[in-house]
Amino acid sequence: MNDVSESLKILVGVGGGIAAYKACALIRSFTKAGHDVHVIPTPSALQFVGTATFEALSGNPVSTTVFDAVDEVQHVRLGQEADLVVIAPATADLMARLAQGRADDLLTASCLVATCPVVLAPAMHTEMWQNPATRANVETLRGRGTVVLEPASGRLTGPDSGPGRLPEPEHIASLALAAVDRFGIFRRSLAGRRILVTAGGTHEQLDPVRFLGNASSGRQGYALADIATQRGAQVELVAAHTVELPTPSGATVTRVSTALELQEAVAALAPSVDAVVMAAAVADVRPASKAAAKMKKGGSDDLSTLALTENPDILRGLVEARRTGDLPEDLLIAGFAAETGDADHTPLDLARAKLRRKGCDLLMCNQVGEGVVFGQPDSAGWLLVPGDQAGHEEVREVPASSKLVVASHILDALEELFPAS
Ligand code: CTP
């Protein structure tokens, strides 16, 4: 694994599409993180954004042609030295040229010599993205190990909307860095699978303005949805409360607030998926009743005590429904264990017990505490798979890394559990 916190040499390629302006924010995001960025636009990208902008943002000279800086053999050097190539936007034409192995400008020539991860963020109208010629080029490129990200869905240039939008620059940056961090993270190993992921923390309302909640940011669940969609899965994301996060490309998002709403959304979707990953931080209890008006001190409301009711254990409910035949027997069910440990038990001891209690097929255990994991971009922990009758769980360590990389370890373990097709 590479340490992406180190300064990397990043080549940012820019294709000739209207989204070329978003490449500026992408360059900025990489330079702000301390990476050394060289920008190579295609000649047509310069119809949209000028050389001066790219030079100012990257702090390096910009060229489009193999005939500049010939004495430094630039057409080979930039690609050879790069730790990462990211092309955003990658247009249909640029992908066609890359698929053919052309080297008729500096960007395509650089891609031919690059041995590092090459990540393309396509942006085009939906019809172009779905055209059989583009599909074939994308397949060719993916087959050779180039990462072709799924485009986001939404408003395109003009009144049309659909898949083909360039994801937000920060989102492209984190996905691209994950490709450096873990080789093969975006392999298309979940094509044809349907995965349900829950994310975020539930809010259990006390009155119209107060709730019981937790510090979950939703990042791990979104990262799982991100990696799963990029691996080709059709993803249903049930999102409770999260910080502001970009929608994973192609995922269908159902928003919920409370544990009961989350349970209802999961119950509706679980029968039609191949796997459920319960990454949501579900409140174990809710107020026994919700006041219709704001509760007042000194009034008839007793604010010093709270009557609570237990929420259903959604994960256990799924396992039970599978056992009784209400859910398909081959449905895979994964859960999380957020553990602080206590005086007598390590987080891993508690996770082993939780795996047995919940009966799921896979459990990701994180050590949590003040400022650790919850809300942070990084995570670490252990993946547990049930063992034999004697309870010898298989435990796999997940090294400290971004939540995208942690998500890839979780999905790897899940993929191993799918019956061979
Ligand atoms: N979970 C659930 N329903 C609940 C509580 C938790 O489905 N009412 C799921 C979570 O999504 C997670 C797993 O159960 O996948 C473990 O959550 P965690 O909060 O660690 O455990 P709890 O079951 O709440 O157990 P405890 O609070 O005793 O540690």
Image (spheres, rainbow, N blue to C red):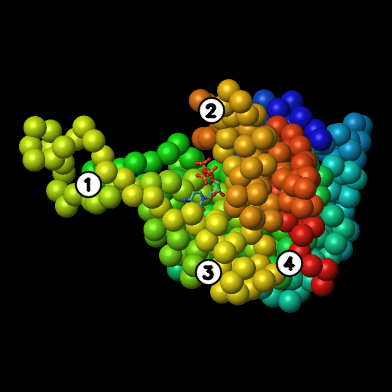
Q: Nearer the viewer, residue 414 or 13?
A: 414
Judging from the image, what secondary structure is the residue with disc 3 in?
helix
Give the foreground label among 4 and 1: 1
Task: Please state which amino acid type lies under the numbered disc 2.
Answer: Gly
Q: Is residue 185 visible?
A: no
In percent of the image, x 21 and y 32: which residue is there? 304
Q: Badges 4 and 1: C-beta atoms under 8 Å apart?
A: no
Residue 289, percent across and down?
24, 51
Location of mark 3 (residue) = 269
Name the residue tied to disc 1: 207
The three-letter code of the residue at mark 4 reads Ala
Residue 338 shows in this picture: yes
- Asked whether mark 1 lies closer than 8 Å to ligand 1, one says no
For the residue carrying disc 4, how many other residues have a C-alpha within 10 Å: few (<14), some (14-19), or many (20+)?
A: some
Q: Mark 3 to mark 1: distance in Å?
A: 29 Å
Marking on residue 191:
4
**Helix, strand, or loop for circle 2?**
loop
Q: Position of residue 163 (x, y in %)?
A: 58, 66
